[in-house]
Image (cartoon, rainbow, N blue to C red):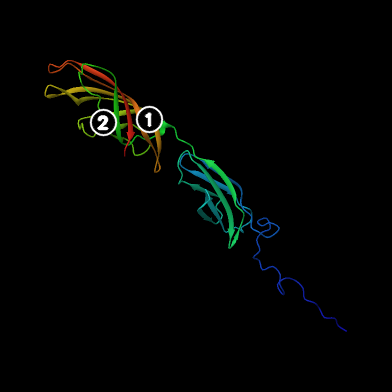
Amino acid sequence: MLAAVGLSGAGCMGGDNGTQPPTDTVDSAGEIRPPSDFTAKATAFKVVLSWTPPGGDYVERYALFRDGAALTTIVGTAATYTDEDVAPGLPYSYEIESRRGDAVSERVAADTETAVPPLQSARVDGTFNITTTFVRKTGYGDYQHPNFGWRFDPQCPEGPCNVDVRDIHERAFRVELERKGAHYTGTYTGQFTIECGNSRSISTVTLNLHVDAAEAVGEEWLATSLSGSMKQSEAAQLGCQPAEATFSVHGLLVR
């Protein structure tokens, strides 16, 4: 009697349909794994995130979180992301998880803190409210220490550089300040606040300023506070005696 021949082999009944993930991407329970070696490296205005994929090509996308809130989703095989929506001198906490379809891995975390740029890298730009105080004076009588509104216009499109300073009321006053690190110096000669009789005197004004404080405004590191000194003098002219004064100067950015 002939015996029946049994069927065997994949493809007839059940078997692998080719859709299972690689074994190095899932754990023993079949759950998707998170990436490894997750790091967050910060500079002043950005944080670079990087990670190592869990293996194979099973992960469809990665979900990134910052301080507990959704940040972005990375689709495909990318293993890095740059977060440029950060401010200097602040702590940030990041998390990442792997996803495929409805499957979600555990999250892994990395913490960092952005750097604070040095004051010498602050851009001096905008209108400052300038207050002055006499250090000493001669020849001015009852001349009171003045306050000013000065507009600082950088001579470059971005970053710190030499600046032009204009007084918003004394229209003749304009001086170029040369930058050396966080210090700015320059001299102006012309009409400036003083009269001799009914005529405007010719003054010599020397400014020596430095950046005291700065903060991030948008994507720029801007000076918000200046201080230093101002020296003003007038030679004898039109029957008036010579005069000179030294002022301490403090300026705050108003816009």
Please tell me whether residue 26 is drawn above or below residue 176 in the rendered image. below
The furthest residue to the bottom: 1
**Structural crowding at the residue carrying mark 2, measured as other residues with C-alpha within 10 Å and reported as few (<14), some (14–19) or many (≥20):** some
Residue at 32% in and 31% down: 251
When the figure is inspected, residue 138 is found, relative to residue 200, above or below; the finding is above
Q: Position of residue 141 (x, y in %)?
A: 20, 18
Q: In terms of depth relative to the viewer, which is nearer, 90 or 136?
A: 136
Q: Nearer the viewer, residue 36 or 211?
A: 211
According to the picture, the residue beneath numbered tag 1 turns out to be 211
Q: For residue 244, what is the image quadrant?
A: top left
CA gap, disc 2 to disc 1?
18 Å
Judging from the image, what secondary structure is the residue with disc 1 in?
A: strand
Q: Could you tell me the amino acid type at mark 1?
A: Val
Left or right, 216 with reference to 168: right
Question: Which label is found at residue 98?
Answer: none
Q: Is residue 161 left or right of residue 44?
A: left
Horizontal and vertical percent position of residue 47: 50, 44
Q: Residue at x 20, y 26 (%)?
A: 193
Q: Is residue 84 above or below residue 205?
A: below
Q: Is residue 50 above or below residue 75?
A: above
Dividing the picture into quadrants, the one containing residue 168 is top left
Looking at this view, name the residue that lies furthest to the left: 198
Farthest residue to the right: give it.
1
Q: Report which residue position mark 2 lands on.
A: 148
All told, the count of numbered labels is 2
Q: In which quadrant of the rendered image does the C terminus lie?
A: top left
| 2 or 1: tag closer to the N-terminus | 2
3 relative position to 196: left or right: right
